[in-house]
Image: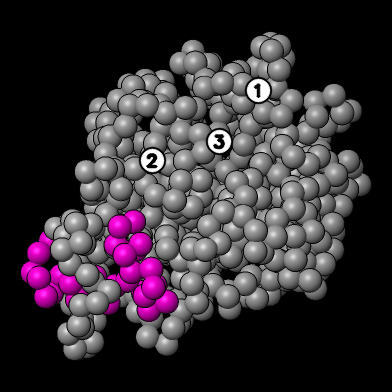
Amino acid sequence: MSKINLDHNKVKECRRLAKEITGKVQDFISNHTSVTVERATLRLLGLDGADPSGIPYPNIIVSHLKEKLSNGVSTYFINGLMKFNISPAELAQAVSENKISLANEPLLPIDDIKKEALRISEEYTSKILNNKAFREKKLFEFPEKKKPWLYVIVATGNIYEDTVQAIAAAEEGADVIAVIRTTAQSLLDYVPFGATTEGFGGTYATQENFKIMRKALDEVGDKLSRYIYLVNYCSGLCMPEIAAMGALERLDMMLNDSMYGILFRDINMKRTFVDQHFSRMINALSGIIINTGEDNYLTTSDAVDKAYTVLASDLINEQFAFRSGMKSNLLGLGHAFEIDPSIENGFLLELAHAQLIREVFPDHPLKYMPPTKFMSGDIFKGYLMNGMFNLSSIITGQEIQLLGMLTEAIHTPFLQDRYLGIKNAQYVMNNARNLGDEITFKPDGIIVKRAKQVLDETHNFLLEINNIGLFKAIEQSMFADIKRTPEGGKGKDGVFKKSLEYFNPFYPIFERELGIKP
């Protein structure tokens, strides 16, 4: 039963509107590809590595075939593999040294090329499905952990130091370890190769770094008899590539939002919408839980005045994810505890927002974000704010809890801050474990009225977006008070309209495995 007298008909209408809004964008997505989708496809076909100057081989092949991208790179790449009978990396090296021109090489019979492409694609799809099966086996083997999962970050810049800190966090009780990317990696239109030991405010997302951290967390997880979830950032200009790398190295969660890069990194919206679709298909196949970034809206706009934008964006993110074959159990939709603590009854408003999100998305593993906007140098107040955030979470039944840490949003958190964040959450959640089951809200009280108000505002907001379209809504700064244009932002030149000859062997495989109707 709803604690806030939720209007289920209005929620159903909001979902209908979100489905219509995303459907209009899906028409564009379905008819376009991007340099990143094609590079991700190459990675899924087994291409990895870089030339002596550090340029990744997927970038070399896609740049070489730029005039052919409307047809997709798969046809030309597989044609080269078949003709020269060499490995993907050897073929890319030959292309980089101008010894082979895939663009000018006569094509073998197209049916033969497609048959071989599908054979290789099925092989790598099996690897991804085996990773998923291994995760499920481990989760069955270990005792189920009570939720919410305690989620902490590591971000030293050095992957080897990150593993030390991640192991320490797991031993203290963390369930989820997120390796934050180095500052501005989302703006790089390539993925660095190999292990890295330098970064600012984070560590580079590379396939080798994923492998190193996965091994460390598996080892400590076996020691603790707990499966430790690994998170990275599947966003920015390389969104689908990072999804492919995460699938191959068995990551468990990915920050993967349909609009975050547009709003907060000024990445072209057409590029982002195309990229998020393919990346989410990969994540869905892998059983990777995605986390969306609605918490960021409340750092640029007011958490009370614009609470409805969070719920509306969650509904839009949900529909985009459904269109990519994702199920509810993989949708870690985002929201946050970000109301100004000086507001009278602010905690009641936080409860209203958290309970509303929980009831609108009862089957989703919601990701709840801690206070950052109003954190200051007052460590005592900050610790209390984090405690109230944890209390709100346990009352409203959140599931993925990014722990508040005293130096969060000021600098990379100290080890001791992480320890205190874990202990704070453990204390509150143990002592108030069933508090939410014991309490009800007054039908005419502050919490119920506030939840109804936010749902009404969300409905009106979605009506307006549906009338003008999502591109125009973003252009009019309706989300996060940030304005972006359809033709502006980084990466626009990397979007291509598909030709009638376009071929990507993974689309039919993903559609089959995920039950997506073409």
Q: How is the image coloured?
A: one colour
Q: Position of residue 164 (x, y in %)?
A: 32, 21
Residue type highlighted by circle 3: Gln
Task: Assign the C terminus to one quadrant of the image.
Answer: bottom left
Q: Position of residue 35 (x, y in %)?
A: 42, 63
Q: Where on the picture, by quarter, is residue 177?
A: top left
Labelled pair 2, 3 in contact (Cβ < 8 Å): no
CA gap between label 2 and label 3 equals 22 Å
Q: Position of residue 66 (x, y in %)?
A: 38, 68
Q: Which residue is mark 1?
A: 387
Going by the picture, which residue comes out furthest to the left?
Answer: 85
Residue type highlighted by circle 2: Ala
Q: Is residue 429 visible?
A: yes
Q: Which residue does the image show at 42% across and 87% down from the upper left?
A: 500
Q: Which residue is mark 2?
A: 205
Q: Which residue is mark 3?
A: 401
Q: Is residue 510 above or below residue 177?
A: below
Q: Secondary structure at mark 1?
A: helix
CA gap between label 1 and label 2 equals 31 Å
Going by the picture, which residue comes out furthest to the front?
Answer: 98
**Mark 3 or 1, nearer chain start:** 1
Left or right: 168 as drawn, with respect to 460: left
Left or right: 354 as drawn, with respect to 491: right
